[in-house]
Amino acid sequence: MWLYLVALVGLWTLLRFIRERKVVSNLQDKHVFITGCDSGFGNLLARQLDRRGMRVLAACLTEKGAEELRNKTSDRLETVILDVTKTESIVAATQWVKERVGNRGLWGLVNNAGISVPLGPIEWMNKEDFAKILDVNLLGMIEVTLSMLPLVRKARGRVVNVSSAVGRVSFSGSSYSISKYGVEAFSDSLRRELSYFGVKVAIIEPGAFKTALISNGGISSSIKTLWDQASSEVKEVYGEEFMLYYLRTMTSLVETCSEDLTLVTDCMEHALTSCHPRTRYSAGWDAKLLYLPMSYLPTFLSDAFFYWSSAKPAQAL
Ligand SMILES: NC(=O)c1ccc[n+]([C@@H]2O[C@H](COP(=O)([O-])OP(=O)(O)OC[C@H]3O[C@@H](n4cnc5c(N)ncnc54)[C@H](OP(=O)(O)O)[C@@H]3O)[C@@H](O)[C@H]2O)c1
């Protein structure tokens, strides 16, 4: 009985492996538009797809980022300046893309731009702190998608949305998680609605990786700022010790996270080039072995894990 089961799982894995290796044809004629290419995953993906011969349309937030990227890539790669929080910037970028793709349409849209701060316990933040992250990570993604969708539909192409492992399990620093839960919901609806047009939607769920997003000190300074701005009541309830523990936990995340960004960009590349892309890609061992299994645990068990493994506020019961 067990032998049959193992053989069945083995066969299924082999068939899936063979199916997923099939690559779409004429990659050199396909345009891919990527947001947030100044650094991190977006920057590496742009260079990776350029090397593969695809026509990369890389959107950067700054001219400096765009120039640096152009210096490292072939003449085929083109850049545009895009701030995903500004409607006029999105409209201009869409027009720019339209002129380049013509009747072929846009094969790939990679919604990658994102920020991680302000980040801290919910009670330390105000509505504007939440809005700042949602504006880039979720509303920016939605507006870019709405604007580019007619071009993607024309090519019967792909939308690749960058979520996070914490788009599955939310714990401290929930403003970021909230935005990524939103990305998951948006992408699920989008995938179902666009399937009628032959457009495929993939979600990338990276664990923790050493990029500017989490390693440039932004997270720790954001926690300190939120603490400084917190009311005297919040400071009394949580206590300085809790704040320092929280700070240490978040900064130690930076030390333990993976430096191999290709684990993420290979998933993105697969989603854009395979005939049979996956719906979701978990990238990194923490995503695969911690966050993914935890997302399937009964809530009382994951709650208990977080309760017992974190520091308690000064006035916890
Ligand atoms: N690193 C991780 O551990 C991790 C884990 C899970 C998910 N992610 C997600 O992966 C994506 C890429 O992040 P990353 O880790 O590669 O960090 P990153 O190096 O900071 O890349 C983010 C990019 O987005 C750009 N950006 C920021 N605000 C923007 C805006 N308003 N409009 C357009 N572009 C904007 C940044 O430009 P500047 O560089 O000029 O600021 C940067 O190029 C994000 O969606 C992030 O949430 C990252």
Image (tube, helix red, strand yellow):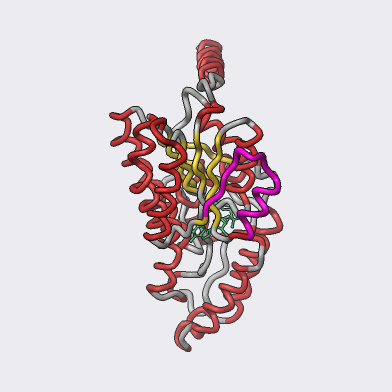
Residue 288, image x, y percentages: 57, 40
Q: Is residue 10 above or below residue 287?
A: above
Residue at the location (52% across, 28% down)?
A: 29
Q: Is residue 253 above or below residue 299?
A: below
The answer to whether residue 72 is visible is yes
Total tally of numbered discs in the picture: 0
Where in the figure is residue 119, as x and y percent of width and height? 51, 67
| In magenta stretch: residue 69 | yes
Q: Left or right of 97: which side holds 287?
A: right
- Residue 129 lies left or right of residue 40; in this view the side is left
Q: Position of residue 255 (x, y in %)?
A: 71, 58
**Would residue 185 be seen by someone viewing this image from the given angle?**
no
Which of the pair 119/240 is nearer the observer? 119
Question: Ligand 1 sits in which quadrant?
Answer: bottom right
Residue shown at 57% from the left, 73% from the top: 223
Q: Residue at x 37, y 60 (%)?
A: 87
Which residues, given as a range, are shown in magenta? 64-80
User: Quick one: 245 or 57, which is closer to the camera?
Assistant: 57
In the rendered image, residue 253 lying in the magenta stretch gets the answer no
Residue found at x 56% / y 64%: 310
Q: Position of residue 140 (x, y in %)?
A: 41, 56
Taking depth in this image into account, of 234 and 264 the one nearest to the observer is: 264
Looking at the picture, does residue 192 appear above or below residue 317? Answer: above
143 or 5, nearer to the observer: 143
Q: Is residue 290 left or right of residue 68?
A: left
**Residue that extends furthest to the bottom in the rendered view of this protein:** 232
Which quarter of the picture shows residue 254? bottom right
Q: Is residue 206 left or right of residue 97?
A: right
| Among the 4 quarters of the image, the one containing residue 86 | bottom left
